[in-house]
């Protein structure tokens, strides 16, 4: 709501002014204010104060940003919807079997769900919370990513070592690309020209030209790469290796490994530190990495690659997502069956929100 200050402030001033300038107000008698005058004065004063308070409230009003988060519950065969203004779950929807990777279309009207044990991608209407149909997929879809224009969905199919391409409008499969063994992680460069798939058993990041649909580079990373994420300016690609315990930083232009980021938590074995999900702030200055059974998220200076902080979240943290205003970061905690809400400014966990059984993926869209 907007009110022009030049019109609103004079109204307040006129309503709260007293004395001879106040219409209908008589001068006080030498012995004090008369009863009739006093009643008029008190009534006008009360009305003016009420209207003044109302106008002040309007002038200071700032609309709050309310967003909805969607969480895939792998063993609950459901998706939980969270209101990030109230910081509570508001609905749980039954979906296909073993939902893992999820993604929203550009306007947030549809949620695409990898129903791994149904060998399909389901489409959920986010307004009605009803499944509206299925998209074709190979066996056991794990993760998916949309092209920047939202026209194509790229899906990793773990059981046939293929990346499937789906036309969103036609709801048809338009091709597939052979990759390494057990493909999982999926990412598309901001300009839409480069597609990345990680293969868990081959231990590679496969860089694919989206025009030719051919692999242009295979980059070896550490054991069991699970996730890939580009910086928003496209300057770097980060790939998490669950068993290797590292994050590989890749130059997507030169198509080569730049460096690896390792993690060290006091009194914790290296085997327990298993990087999975990665999220960058929009300015590219910070990265947040989910560390699996370490039950922590690492905060990394994305320019120096130095670890700034570890903070404790729920058990077996898988994936994470920012609210669009970057006020909160939400983490899906697979064993504690909850979502941790992190205040990004203070880097403190504000609340844990119970969701379904074994939460795995999380995405956030405007409400």
Image (tube, helix red, strand yellow):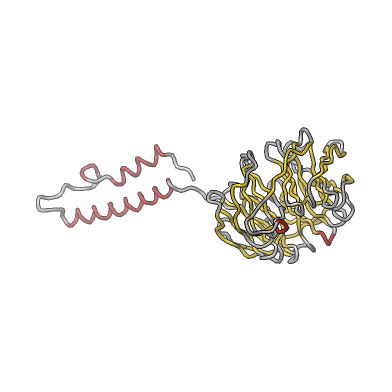
94 or 236: nearer the eye? 236
Q: Is residue 89 left or right of residue 190?
A: left
On screen, residue 158 versus residue 313, left or right, reads right
Position of residue 129 measured from the top left corner of the image (x, y, whole percent): 70, 59
For the image, the number of numbered tags is: 0
Question: Which of 334 and 128 lies nearest the eye of the viewer?
Answer: 334
Q: What is the quadrant of residue 124 in the picture?
A: bottom right
The residue located at (46%, 48%) in the rendering is 61
Q: Residue at x 70, y 52 (%)?
A: 277
Image x and y of residue 41, in percent: 23, 52
In x, y percent, where is residue 2? 48, 43
41 or 367, nearer to the observer = 367
Above-or-below relation of 41 to 93: above
Name, please, the residue furthest toward the top: 254
Residue 44 location in percent, x, y?
A: 28, 52
Which residue: 48% across, 47% down? 62
**Would residue 258 be found to the left or right of residue 352 on screen?**
right
Given residues 271 and 286, the one toward you in this image is 271
């Amino acid at each position: 709501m907007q009110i022009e200050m030049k019109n609103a402030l004079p109204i307040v001033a006129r309503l709260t002014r007293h004395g001879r300038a106040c219409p209908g107000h008589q001068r006080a008698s030498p012995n004090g204010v008369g009863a009739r005058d006093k009643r008029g004065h008190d009534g006008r004063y009360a009305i003016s104060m009420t209207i003044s308070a109302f106008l002040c409230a309007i002038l200071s009003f700032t609309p709050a940003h309310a967003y909805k988060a969607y969480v895939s519950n792998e063993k609950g065969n459901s998706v939980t919807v969270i209101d990030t203004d109230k910081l509570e779950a508001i609905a749980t929807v039954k979906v296909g079997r073993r939902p893992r990777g999820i993604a929203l279309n550009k306007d947030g009207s549809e949620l695409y769900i990898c129903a791994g044990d149904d060998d399909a991608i389901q489409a959920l209407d986010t307004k009605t919370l009803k499944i509206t149909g299925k998209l074709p997929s190979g066996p056991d879809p794990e993760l998916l990513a949309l092209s920047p224009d939202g026209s194509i969905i790229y899906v990793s199919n773990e059981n046939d070592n293929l990346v499937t391409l789906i036309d969103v409008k036609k709801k048809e499969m338009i091709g597939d690309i052979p990759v390494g063994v057990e493909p999982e992680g999926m990412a598309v460069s901001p300009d839409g020209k480069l597609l990345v798939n990680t293969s868990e058993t081959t231990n590679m990041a496969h860089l694919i030209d989206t025009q030719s649909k051919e692999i242009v580079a295979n980059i070896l990373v550490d054991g069991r790469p699970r996730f890939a994420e580009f910086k928003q300016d496209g300057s770097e690609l980060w790939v998490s290796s669950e068993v290797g315990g590292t994050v590989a930083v890749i130059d997507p232009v030169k198509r080569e490994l730049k460096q690896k980021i390792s993690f060290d938590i006091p009194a914790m074995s290296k085997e327990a530190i298993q990087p999975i999900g990665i999220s960058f702030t929009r300015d590219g200055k910070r990265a947040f990495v989910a560390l699996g059974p370490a039950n922590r998220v690492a905060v990394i200076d994305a320019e120096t690659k130095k670890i700034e902080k570890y903070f404790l979240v729920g058990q077996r943290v898988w994936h994470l997502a920012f609210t669009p205003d970057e006020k909160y970061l939400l983490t899906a905690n697979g064993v504690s069956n909850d979502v941790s809400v992190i205040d990004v400014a203070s880097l403190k966990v504000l609340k844990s929100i119970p969701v379904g059984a074994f939460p795995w993926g999380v995405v956030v869209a405007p409400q």
